[in-house]
Every structure is written in structure tokens, then in C-alpha cells.
């Protein structure tokens, strides 16, 4: 199943993430696709709020720490950024398989770099700028595909 929406600001992207959280149920792997600055972490802010795991302002990109954990009453969210991970061996050192417990959701940025993660995913969220002539810089097209 695939759905698509367009948001017009970071606030709308966060709000969409809150709504999307109601459709996500652990255990789950979610791959977040999009160029740098596409809004992946902004969407995770809303998902974390939707799960009651963190306030939007407390969610930051895990670019340098690689993994952030957010504990909610119904699920533990792991926000993972694989931008700086280059090899399968480096990926294995993160032990992502150990994180996927029955009450966990893995939100993985740049997971498309690794074919195994693409096979294991349950949901893919692609974010990108709207390509229309009148679109603003903050408008995002968000496509959610679930298996």
C-alpha cells in the first residue's frame, strides 16, 4: 500500500509524523529515504511525539552518534543514521538486529545503502522537495509504502 502527501512547512511535516505514528506498530523497520535536508529527522520528530517517546525539540539527527533511543509508553524508537556508514562490516558493528525487540521500531535514515535492510524493511518513507514551479523550499512530498 502506498500513500502520498505534501506538507508545506516543518510544522506540517511534524504533524504528519504524529498522525503516521498511529499507523506504525512494533516490531517494525522503517527506511527513511531522501537527500540531505529532505526532512527525514523532521518527520521523526513527529513520529516520536506521536508515540509519546520524545518532544519534537528533543529529537535531533543521529549523524555523529549514529543511534538515538527514545523510550515511549508503547514503543521504544531507535532513530538511526547510516549516512557515514560505508561497509557491511561497519553496519554489523551497530548490531541493529539486537535492537529489533517486540516493542521496538527502527527508523533508519540512509538504509537504502544496504540491500539487506531494504529486504528486511516493513515500511519505506520517501521524502523529497515538491518539483512544481510554485513550490516553496519548505514543501515536501512524503510517500509512505508499506508491505
Image (cartoon, rainbow, N blue to C red):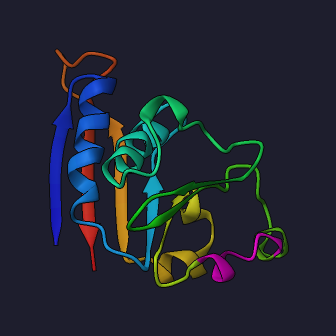
Q: Which residues are magenta?
A: 93-99
Instruction: Tell me if residue 120 comes above or below residue 45 in the rendering.
Output: below
Image quadrant in which the N terminus is located: bottom left
Residue 67 lies in quadrant: bottom right
Instruction: Tell me if residue 147 comes above or below residue 124 in the rendering.
Output: below
Image quadrant in which the C terminus is located: bottom left
Is residue 130 visible in the rendered structure shown here? Answer: no
Instruction: Tell me if residue 134 comes above or below residue 65 in the rendering.
Output: above
Residue 121 lies in quadrant: bottom left
Q: Image check: 113 left or right of 127?
A: right
Residue 5, horizontal then vertical, whole percent = 16, 44
Q: Residue sitting at 45 percent across and 51 percent down?
A: 53
Is residue 2 visible in the rendered structure shown here? Answer: yes
Q: Nearer the viewer, residue 138 or 10?
A: 10
**Which is the main secondary structure of the residues drawn in magenta?**
helix
Q: Nearer the viewer, residue 143 or 45?
A: 45
Residue 52, horizontal then vertical, whole percent = 38, 50
Residue 8, horizontal then vertical, whole percent = 21, 24
> Looking at the image, how many numbered discs can be counted on the residues?
0
Q: Residue sitting at 68 percent across and 50 percent down?
A: 83
Instruction: Tell me if residue 54 comes above or below residue 140 in the rendering.
Output: below
Q: Image check: 119 left or right of 147?
A: right
Q: Image check: 118 left or right of 9?
A: right
Residue 3, horizontal then vertical, whole percent = 15, 58
Residue 95 lies in quadrant: bottom right
Q: Residue sitting at 78 percent across and 60 percent down?
A: 86
Q: Residue sitting at 56 percent across and 76 percent down?
A: 117
Single out the residue that lies furthest toward the front.
73
Q: Is residue 96 magenta?
A: yes
Amino acid at each position: 500500500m502506498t500513500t502520498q502527501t505534501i506538507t508545506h512547512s516543518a510544522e506540517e511535516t511534524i504533524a504528519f509524523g504524529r498522525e503516521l505514528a498511529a499507523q506504525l506498530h512494533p516490531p517494525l523497520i522503517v527506511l527513511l529515504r531522501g537527500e540531505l535536508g529532505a526532512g527525514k529527522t523532521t518527520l521523526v520528530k513527529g513520529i516520536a511525539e506521536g508515540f509519546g517517546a520524545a518532544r519534537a525539540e528533543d529529537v535531533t539527527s543521529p549523524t555523529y552518534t549514529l543511534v538515538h533511543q527514545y523510550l515511549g509508553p508503547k514503543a521504544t524508537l531507535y532513530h538511526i543514521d547510516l549516512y557515514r556508514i560505508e561497509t557491511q562490516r561497519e553496519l554489523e558493528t551497530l548490531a541493529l538486529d539486537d535492537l529489533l525487540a517486540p516493542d521496538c521500531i527502527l527508523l533508519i535514515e540512509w538504509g537504502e545503502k544496504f540491500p539487506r535492510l531494504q529486504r528486511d524493511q516493513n515500511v519505506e518513507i520517501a521524502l523529497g522537495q515538491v518539483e512544481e514551479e510554485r513550490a516553496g523550499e519548505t514543501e515536501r512530498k512524503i510517500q509512505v509504502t508499506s508491505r
